Each structure stands twice: as structure tokens, then as C-alpha cells.
């Protein structure tokens, strides 16, 4: 904390106090308003917390104007090109990139924890056959504390580490089982001879009746999706994990709360919306009509997968995943199918059209991740489950950081009350 302060004055010009300014290591400073009520008897009003820092964190940094995303100081472009999802998990959890021995040990631990308790397999049978995979995943993750209650002492660092490993390791298994159950197919046990993303695809699409070999291009594309979605600062689901965790609840309950928040279509449903939009457009010949609708202020239609709430000029993740998307489509010979042909033509128009350029409506990560997941044959209702699988590492890192913060206290937002003023109770016969 530096010497800078923001001075407060009444409407009559009298000084009422001063608020310290806290300097971050990178990015904008923040005004410390913790003593605002004490000095002024007022609170701040900030719906959606758009101008409020809810915590101090050293995990992820975003600069939306510059189009920057960093995990622990490492640019997402470098991590996506040179790293793996499990190495990014280690980085997010521990703050530093691992050496070869540390990474090998971490990968081995995660691999050895991929199995779930056999009773959890039977837990799925209590769900309706047509349940949404997110509903199943949410329920199963929330129930993990009933199966792994030997390591949920949040004040025990070893317990927290074990729970972190279990969650990262078991999420692909839980996610794949959610898909298999809704499809009425037999569950596939994890194969510890496979890598993390390769193993997930194997559990999704393998069948006891025939041998299944994972396409390495597909496995790399899936790993890239996981890397790019591993953390994204204090978004709705991450803030939910922190708020739930601030009460001292166990890690499985906190992560389940994050999954519930992610399930909302305004948060985790963007890449699913991209595919639904492309299916509505139908063919290349219809694109011009829908583009004109998107430009019209009188039409409610919007193109999904273009622009971003945080990134004002470009989404750095989109540039990375675009190449992987093209490589996968070529590997699967999918470029000429109607949906992908429509998508690529829409992308071309968006990158060249003056309206899109002026309004900074560039293709974002959801546009390309939606295309990748669709090309892999993953159903739309599994898209957000995969998002949750990727984000688990970031959620755990944020949860653990919160518990280590000496300033941490249970979340208790204030409000601007606009209800009835104090009034007397009226007997029922007199109302």
C-alpha cells in the first residue's frame, strides 16, 4: 500500500476522511473502501461488482483493453503453445511452473486418482435417464464429500492438496459418466495409460464392444480448450466458489456451487449458443440475411460468439484456438459440411465487414471452442460440463488462495434498501 489517498468531502465542502489507494503489482490501482461506512455512514452501490475488487489475488490477470490474459504472470499465448493442461493446473495451484520431476510426480498423482468410488457409479442410477448432464455433474460433485470425507478439513494443508488432486483427476470421469448415463451406454473406466485429455475422450466415446483410438489432433484440441478455460479472474462462477468457500464449507461443496453458477446461460452457455445460432442460419446463402438482422437495432437477433464483455479489442484465446479448430476440421474432413462451411464464411465476413470491425465484434474463444466440440461429436448439453471440467483447476486455486488470505472473512455484501419504511403491525381483523 502506497501513500496515495482519495479524500472525501461533504456537499458543504468539509473533509470527511480519506480512503487509501492500494497499488497492484500490474494493472490499475484500487480504492480501499473498507472504512467508508465508518467515515461517512454510507456504502458503495455497484450492481454486478463492475467497479469493485472483491478480493486480492495473484492467480490470473486480464486486461480487456489490451487483450491480455496471464496465468501467474505467464501469457496465455505461451502456455497454449508450449504447455499442457496438467502443467497449467500445477502452475495455478502452486504459483510456479514445475520442473520435470515435479511435473512427472503431479501427473502420476492425478492419473492415480482418476477412478471414482464404485458406489458413485450407482449414484447415477438415481437420476432420470434424460437428465441434463450438468444436473448430474452438479449432483455428483456435491456428493463427493460423502465419499471422500477423510480429507475435507480446510485448515489442513495436506487435506486441501488431496482434495485438489481428487477434483482435478475425477472431473473427466464424472463428466464422461454423465454423458454415458444419458446415452444409456456402459461406463468406461479411466485408462491410466492415456494422457488427461486423451483419457477423457476415450471415456466419452469408447465402448466395450469395439476398440477405440483417440485422434491425437482431437486430444490436443481438447487439451487446448482446457488450458484456455482453466481460469478467468473473478467471473461469476469463481466469485461464487469464493463466496461459498468463505463460510468454511468443504471444497466439494464450493466447487459444486461454482458449477451451479456456470450452468447459467449468461455465463457458461456461450459456445452452445454458437452452434444453435449456426443451426438456425443453416446455409452460407442465409448468412447475409442474418448479418443484416444482427446490425439492426430493431431486431433482437444477435450473432453469438462475436465480441466479448471483458476483451474490448480482441480475445487472446480466440487467436490461439482458431488454428487448432482449422487443424481439427482438416483432420476430420469436416470443412465442407454445411454447418462448418457456414461458420467459416461467417467468420470471414466478421473479419472483413466494416460494421463488425467498427463495433469490435471479432470471433471469440466460444466461437471456435463450439466448433471444435461439435466436430468432436460432443452433444450440446455436454459443452458446459467440459467448461466446468476445465475451470475446476482455477476454482480450486482461487478457493485455496482465499483460505490463505489473512484478510479473508465470510462474504456479506451490503444493499441499497428500497422497501417499506418501519410501520406498525395491524391486527388481521383491521386490515
Image (cartoon, helix red, strand yellow):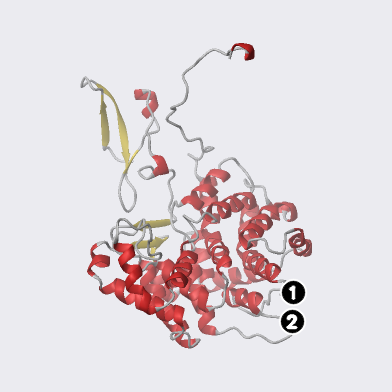
Q: Are marks 2 and 1 in contact (CB under 8 Å)?
A: yes
Earlier along the polypeptide chain: callout 2 or callout 1?
1
SS label for mark 2: loop
Residue position for label 1: 186
Would you identify the image quadrant in which residue 192 lies? bottom right
Measure how far apart labels 2 and 1 are at the Cα level. 8 Å
Q: Nearer the viewer, residue 28 or 216?
A: 216
Farthest-out residue, left: 13
Drawn side of residue 409 relative to residue 113, left or right: left
What residue would you read off at disc 2?
A: 208
In the picture, the disc for residue 197 is none
Kindly tell me whether residue 146 is visible in this rendering. yes
- Can residue 323 be seen? no
Measuring from the top left, give residue 231's x and y in whole percent: 47, 59
Residue 423 % position (x, y) = 51, 14
The residue depicted at 62 percent of the width and 76 percent of the height is: 199
Quadrant of the rendered image containing residue 7? top left
Q: Quadrant of the N terminus?
A: top left
* Mark 2 crowdedness (10 Å alpha carbons): few <14, some 14-19, many ≥20: few
Query: In the rendered view, does 393 fall on the left or right side of 28?
Result: right
| Residue at point 35%, 43% (across, down) | 51
* 19 is higher (above) or lower (below) than 173: above
**Residue 76 coordinates in the image, percent (x, y):** 40, 67
* Tally of numbered discs: 2
10 Å crowding of disc 1: few (<14), some (14-19), many (20+) = few
User: Is residue 411 shown above or below 368?
Assistant: above
Where residue 172 sits in the image (x, y, percent)? 62, 68
Disc 1, SS: loop
Amino acid at each position: 500500500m502506497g501513500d496515495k489517498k482519495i479524500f472525501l468531502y461533504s456537499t458543504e465542502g468539509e473533509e470527511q476522511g480519506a480512503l487509501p489507494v492500494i497499488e497492484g503489482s500490474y494493472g490499475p490501482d484500487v480504492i480501499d473502501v473498507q472504512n467508508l461506512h465508518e467515515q461517512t455512514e454510507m456504502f458503495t452501490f455497484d450492481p454486478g461488482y463492475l467497479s469493485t475488487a472483491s478480493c486480492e489475488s495473484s492467480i490470473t490477470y486480464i486486461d480487456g483493453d489490451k487483450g491480455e490474459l496471464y496465468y501467474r504472470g505467464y501469457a496465455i499465448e505461451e502456455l497454449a503453445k508450449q504447455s499442457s493442461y496438467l502443467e497449467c493446473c500445477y502452475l495455478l495451484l502452486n504459483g510456479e511452473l514445475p520442473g520435470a520431476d515435479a511435473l512427472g510426480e503431479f501427473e502420476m498423482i492425478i492419473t492415480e486418482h482418476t477412478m471414482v468410488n464404485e458406489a458413485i457409479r450407482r449414484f447415477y442410477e438415481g437420476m432420470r435417464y434424460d437428465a441434463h448432464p450438468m444436473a448430474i455433474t452438479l449432483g455428483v460433485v456435491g456428493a463427493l464429500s460423502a465419499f471422500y470425507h477423510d480429507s475435507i478439513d480446510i485448515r489442513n494443508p495436506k487435506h486441501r492438496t488431496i482434495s485438489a488432486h481428487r477434483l482435478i483427476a475425477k472431473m473427466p470421469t464424472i463428466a464422461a459418466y454423465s454423458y454415458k448415463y444419458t446415452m444409456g451406454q456402459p461406463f468406461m473406466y479411466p485408462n491410466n495409460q492415456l494422457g488427461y485429455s486423451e483419457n477423457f475422450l476415450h471415456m466419452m466415446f469408447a465402448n466395450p464392444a469395439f476398440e477405440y483410438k483417440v485422434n491425437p489432433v482431437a486430444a490436443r484440441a481438447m487439451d487446448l480448450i482446457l488450458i484456455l478455460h482453466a481460469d478467468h479472474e473473478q467471473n461469476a462462477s469463481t466469485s461464487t466458489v469464493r463466496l461459498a468457500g468463505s463460510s468454511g464449507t468443504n471444497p466439494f461443496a464450493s466447487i459444486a456451487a461454482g458449477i451451479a453458477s456456470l450452468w447459467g446461460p449468461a455465463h457458461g452457455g456461450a459456445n452452445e449458443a454458437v452452434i444453435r445460432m449456426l443451426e438456425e442460419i443453416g446455409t452460407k446463402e442465409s448468412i447475409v440475411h442474418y448479418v443484416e438482422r444482427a446490425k439492426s437495432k430493431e431486431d433482437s437477433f444477435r450473432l453469438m460468439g462475436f465480441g466479448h464483455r471483458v476483451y474490448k479489442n480482441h480475445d487472446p484465446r480466440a487467436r490461439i484456438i482458431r488454428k487448432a479448430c482449422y487443424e481439427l476440421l482438416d483432420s476430420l474432413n469436416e470443412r465442407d459440411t454445411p454447418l462448418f462451411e457456414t461458420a467459416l464464411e461467417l467468420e470471414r465476413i466478421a473479419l472483413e465487414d466494416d460494421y463488425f470491425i467498427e463495433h469490435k465484434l471479432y470471433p471469440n474463444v466460444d466461437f471456435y471452442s463450439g466448433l471444435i466440440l461439435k466436430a468432436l461429436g460432443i452433444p450440446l448439453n455436454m459443452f458446459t460440463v467440459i467448461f466446468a471440467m476445465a475451470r475446476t483447476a482455477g476454482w480450486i486455486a482461487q478457493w485455496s488462495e482465499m483460505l490463505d488470505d489473512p484478510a479473508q472473512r465470510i462474504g456479506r455484501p451490503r444493499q441499497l434498501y428500497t422497501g417499506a419504511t418501519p410501520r406498525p403491525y395491524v391486527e388481521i381483523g383491521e386490515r
